[in-house]
Amino acid sequence: MIEIRPITGIGEIEKGEDLGGILARALAPIAPKSSDFLVVTQKVVSKAEGQMVALEDVVPGQRATEIAGAIGKDPRLVELVLAESVEVLRAERGVLITRHRLGLVMANSGIDCSNVGAGSGERALLLPLDPDASAERIADAVEALCGVRPGVVISDSFGRPWRNGVVNVAVGCAGVPSIHDKRGETDRDGRTLQATLIAYGDLIASAAGLAMGEADEGVPAVLIRGLTLSGAPQPASALVRAVEEDLFR
Amino acid sequence: MIEIRPITGIGEIEKGEDLGGILARALAPIAPKSSDFLVVTQKVVSKAEGQMVALEDVVPGQRATEIAGAIGKDPRLVELVLAESVEVLRAERGVLITRHRLGLVMANSGIDCSNVGAGSGERALLLPLDPDASAERIADAVEALCGVRPGVVISDSFGRPWRNGVVNVAVGCAGVPSIHDKRGETDRDGRTLQATLIAYGDLIASAAGLAMGEADEGVPAVLIRGLTLSGAPQPASALVRAVEEDLFR
């Protein structure tokens, strides 16, 4: 049996706080295991890492102003979105979809203007600079305090083409087989399996999302216990399809 | 705490078998609750409903033969893929992506040639005719035997643009808020939430996928317990984005 446990008592996270230490102390009472997976929302990681930007400090350039005018968005937000991205895939009907500098294709380069702190109506929260490294640092902190090193997943919620609604995916991983290649293994009837790259990192993020979603994002961390996965650890960057393999450019 | 329990002892499912009754009997010892969610793989549902096709009975038409030649696939399989689809989105590099008659955008119209039964190398398994109706029938069967009606999700694994690997999504739902619209609710700081349609059906399918994936698809059903979701029941068809809202056509 697999268990999904919300981690409570973390509270608001501010810039510069030792998020890894806070998470480690919150985990200590439930005796984390090396086989556990700790899932942490991107938001608290970004907040701790100081990725909050005051919109009043942003001066939109010409391109941001043009796009913002065309699709009806705040030009300062569009400036941030462009600065975080390497490519604009769609800008229409109020929707701005970009390829983030990390390769992630997402709305608004993953920049969030909700739940970014009381009185922060004019602030925007960017993704962590390097979420795979952030996950490793959190694993380090848990190991230092608890003596075991669980897998760590940093999750965000993404929209998808063709399907309504958002799901949680992994944007950072440490000690997790974020993607596992079963190609070449055989099925129960002895046939070689086709198309069986499994995105475990995203499955873990989505499972944790079930325990995070009902509290208006007030549950920033979740522990998954009892899950045995084969496959070598891979960073979340391994989940990003190479541009040249993208059939939908 | 949310629990994900594999349901064992179901065995191979053949055409015409009473899958709902089999699942109900497998669940009875663990006393299902109306708040539980039962996740069942598309494969066993399709097998029970007789959606297996012998490729030797398929006569490929001209279009299937042309596409098969161009991308290097069995023309009989391509004929089935076309017959199940309303639109071909991509046919290149060995990949055939279609919009299934149910609206689902997926590789090969969801047709599977692995794990479709011993000695069945030349057989293909189509999706259920109406997976939302299949989910309702399974819920009916559990209710008839166990006296409670859990939510039921029929899951399949889908590839995605821009991300490597497959994840599980919901292709059929009964008694599940497959998608929940949080727009208009406020966040913790009182701001109105944006972009918060949550695809609970897909999150449930992905969580269950963690318990299904390691057994070479030998775990056809999973029970999720302890999950409280708000929102009215919606069929899995509500997860399919309307073609006119698709930014990536």
Image (cartoon, coloured by chain):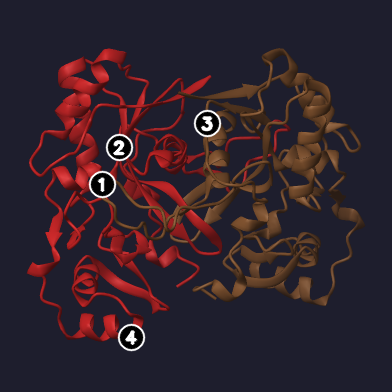
Chain colours: A red, B brown
Q: Are marks 2 and 3 in contact (CB under 8 Å)?
A: no
Q: Are marks 2 and 4 on the same chain?
A: yes
As helix, strand or loop, the secondary structure at mark 1 comes to helix
First of labels 1, 2 by sequence position = 1
Q: CA distance from mark 4 to mark 3?
A: 42 Å
Q: Amino acid at mark 4?
A: Ala
Q: Are marks 1 and 2 in contact (CB under 8 Å)?
A: yes
What residue is pinned by disc 3? B227
Q: CA distance from mark 2 to mark 4?
A: 35 Å
Image disc number at residue A43: 1
Image quarter where the N terminus of chain B lies is: top left
Q: Looking at the image, is B26 positioned above or below residue B104?
A: above
As helix, strand or loop, the secondary structure at mark 2 comes to loop
**Chain at tag 3:** B
Residue B120 appearing in the image: no
First of labels 2, 4 by sequence position = 4
Q: CA distance from mark 1 to mark 3?
A: 23 Å
Where is residue B101? Give x, y as percent: 74, 64
Q: Amino acid at mark 3?
A: Leu
What residue is pinned by disc 4? A70
Q: Residue at 19% x, 73% y: name it.
A: A79
Q: Residue at 10% x, 44% y: name it.
A: A15
Callout 3 environment at 10 Å: few (<14), some (14 to 19), or many (20+)? some
Image disc number at residue A220: 2
Q: Are marks 4 and 3 on the same chain?
A: no
